[in-house]
Amino acid sequence: PQTIHLKDYTPFGYRIDSVELTFKLHPTATRVISKIAFAPNPAASDTRFFLHGEELELISAAIDGAPVIPRKVEGGIEADVPDAPFVWEAEVEISPETNTALEGLYMSNGMYSTQCEAEGFRKITFYPDRPDVMAVFTVRIEGDQPVLLSNGNPVERGDGVAVWHDPWPKPSYLFALVAGELINHPDSFTTKSGKEVELNIWVRPGDEDKCAFGMEALKKSMKWDEDTYGREYDLDIFNIVAVDDFNMGAMENKGLNIFNSSCVLASQATSTDANFERIEGIIAHEYFHNWTGNRITCRDWFQLCLKEGLTVYRDQMFSGDMRSHAVKRIEEVMILRARQFREDNGPLAHPVRPESFVEINNFYTATVYEKGAEIIGMLRRLIGDEAYRKGCDLYFDRHDGEAVTIEDWLASFEEVTGRDLAQFKQWYSQAGTPRLKMSETWEDGALTLNFTQTTPPTPGQKEKNPQVIPIAVGLIGPNGDEVVPTTVLEMTEAEQSFTFEGLGARPVASVLRDFSAPVILEREIDDATRAFLLAHDTDPFQTWEMGRMLAKDTLIAMIVRDAAPAPAYLDAIRAVVTDETQDPAFRALVFGLPSQDDLAQTLFDAGITPDPQKIYDARESLRHTVARHLSDALPTLFRPTEPGTFTPDAEGSGRRSLSLAALSYLALLDGGAAATSLFAQADNMTEQAGALQALLSAGLGTSELQAFEAQWKDDRLVMDKWFTMQVASAAPDKAAEVAEALSHHPAFTNKNPNRFRAVFGALSANHAGFHHASGAAYKLLADQLISLDSLNPQITARMSGAFETWKRYDADRQGMIRTELERILATPNLSRDTTEMVSRILS
Ligand code: B3K
Ligand code: ZN
């Protein structure tokens, strides 16, 4: 397979004045007729007329009305064209029903759907399928489905036909088409300039009672983008469609967002609080793309973070405004560390703006998305809120309707601030997580914080330069009062010191408040100082972080030295968890223990080969100790929701998360009594599933599991939870067996990504089970990936990431994993997606 390089970018030789597409829908023989007005692009030097095309059967082609036979070349076709504007016409045939890759036009439960990002449009018709070619589309759909949708505004609707026109120029990856028997949940929104927009959420019959929450989230998002970024919606209609078979969460196609049904359908009975929160965030994310991604898009796929990092940052701020910034920030950091730091630490590490790729779908990563969002947050912290908003305004003004680069984005901020962002830009090009070491000196009322930064080598990048690191610091006096409020120190050198003068008594420094930069802070700090900050810091992230460090140290000592759980930790969490003056959601977060994967990485970083079974045992033992230590408090902390009072907001969800955290400890003490009764009574999925989870993780719940299946066997999304919970809570020596058995369950299918992930995503997330010494889980996952690859390369490639941490473990495990990876790689006709991923993991 061919490697594409950022440095090789050249513009396409032609611009497009208009695109007209006609679809004659048929499950196995859909005809797509295209009429495209091209004109030479004066800004381009390469005049080769090449159109991408994959898995297309060409029926006919013409240039300016004269039939032509284009030359077949790798990945598409070529033709000789006039040196003046001309019209290209083609008719192709495609087969949506046999398209199991879920890319291009495909069928899901009898409905037609598309997924074009990143390079799926070339499976629909011949086209310059690259984001820098933007055009105005008119789409005619002929089919007997009652609902026929595409991008833009509806212009014509008749029997078996619909025509849509999208006035905004867009790249092909934002094209969408949906056809099926769908029901809408309608509403409307009046924009700030008084324009009435029709809103619809389209679902399969039976799901119409699960749309209200998503619709509210959409309206809140539209209002928020007006209020916060001054961005107004720009079409007469905005459609969202729920699709069961979908590779990712959702897709921001212009005016027609397509969602994995798990990311839009919500109801009290079937969705957990976490589902509600995620749905609200994803609806916002896709809506926000209308400006950051659609009106202004990426010049090439290397610039993916331009739209994704920024849009994640925007959805994070939205969720913080809707819920709690403090809780949201802690959750973001947990996800960043679990996924992005893990990626940055292994063979798949890559810059936020990669320099080369084989298959771009492999770069929709935590680094591009989450680290990309952290970069925007750092930029804003460095330049301030006002300059941030001004820079955004300038960017929107200047580049509307264009396909641009990270350089264009940063130039807007350089212009409004007069700052040189050249060094800052390295956040986009340098892979790896910087290690920030800190020491302190105290002399004559002055506290000096000394920092050094280093970034470890990553694949293809041995040497690293110092980055610009915004370090948010506050100082707390010995009596617990804040003596210096949050100040942002701007570190730019490899070694740098910052002094606070005129201090009466030696304060305690609170460093990296709000997690102001995506770095690993290494700081000599004793348990007493941690406990002090846990009690007195005004920064909620730091408070949580101190609790987390205490928990981690305790667990590490238990793993390495067979130590007993530290009293400092037990007392500290008791104080926070029982503190009724604090937000329950925050207390629940402090209650949680670090994950096994996090502990494995921490051990590895300390030069100790992690033993997954030992990690599991220590964590289980600590769970029991915490349960006993808090046995008097647990019954009061466990407070089920009064039947009939459920609300999916931050307040209700926070209360339930604390209550359920307490329940999972309680289940270790009361033989499952409290959980069993909650399971029977709960009128909402959060508590029904939470109770079942508590039972399973206490080694109980067999009959509840059966009852749950009987109750929910007809609900796909709830059944995904049923599959996941069993694999996730299986004991280390049983995990592979449980997953294997579930893969033979009549409701299992590897054609549905949600179901496949429910079982095998859960298997790789069950740390001790996945890494069990028998190697059974490695082999099982490899078998599954090998058989999935020919059906769905994208999901296969993504799930092969389960092996990315293999070099942490002992020689036996490494040997077993290597064998499986090599076996996958040796599979005949392995997809480009999986070949690239597995080769990178092995290298
Ligand atoms: N832009 C899409 C992701 C497309 C993934 C293609 N493999 C969803 C999103 O980030 O909003
Ligand atoms: Zn996105």
Image: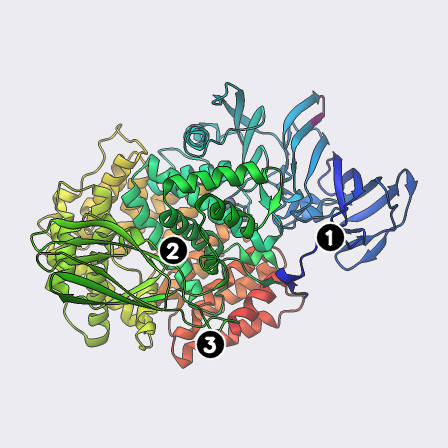
Tell which tag, 3 or 2, sits nearer the viewer: 2
- Vertical arrangement, residue 711 with respect to residue 773, above or below: above
Mark before the other along the chain sequence, 2 or 1: 1
Real-space CA distance between mark 1 and mark 3, rounded to the nearest whole angstrom: 37 Å
Q: Which mark is residue 816?
A: 3
Residue type at mark 2 is Leu
Residue type at mark 1 is Glu
* Residue 213, x across and y down, in percent: 41, 30
Q: Quadrant of residue 726?
A: bottom left
Q: What is the tally of numbered marks visible in this picture?
A: 3
Q: Is residue 696 left or right of residue 315?
A: left
* Residue 436, x across and y down, in percent: 32, 66
Magenta region, residue range? 158-163
- Between 821 and 832, the residue placed more toward the observer is 832
User: What secondary structure is found at the residue carrying circle 1?
Assistant: loop
Residue located 39% across and 43% down the image: 316
- Between 546 and 653, the residue placed more toward the observer is 546
- The residue pinned by badge 2 equals 336
* Residue 111, x across and y down, in percent: 62, 36
- Graded by Cα atoms within 10 Å as few (under 14), some (14 to 19) or many (20 or more), the crowding at tag 3 reads some
- Between 218 and 754, the residue placed more toward the observer is 218
- The residue pinned by badge 1 equals 54
Q: Quadrant of the N terminus?
A: bottom right
Residue located 41% across and 57% down the image: 762
Q: Is residue 140 left or right of residue 235?
A: right
Residue 136 colored in magenta in the image: no
**Residue 747 in view, yes or no:** no
Real-space CA distance between mark 3 and mark 2, rounded to the nearest whole angstrom: 29 Å
- Vertical arrangement, residue 712 with respect to residue 152, above or below: below
- Vertical arrangement, residue 739 with respect to residue 482, above or below: below
- Graded by Cα atoms within 10 Å as few (under 14), some (14 to 19) or many (20 or more), the crowding at tag 1 reads some
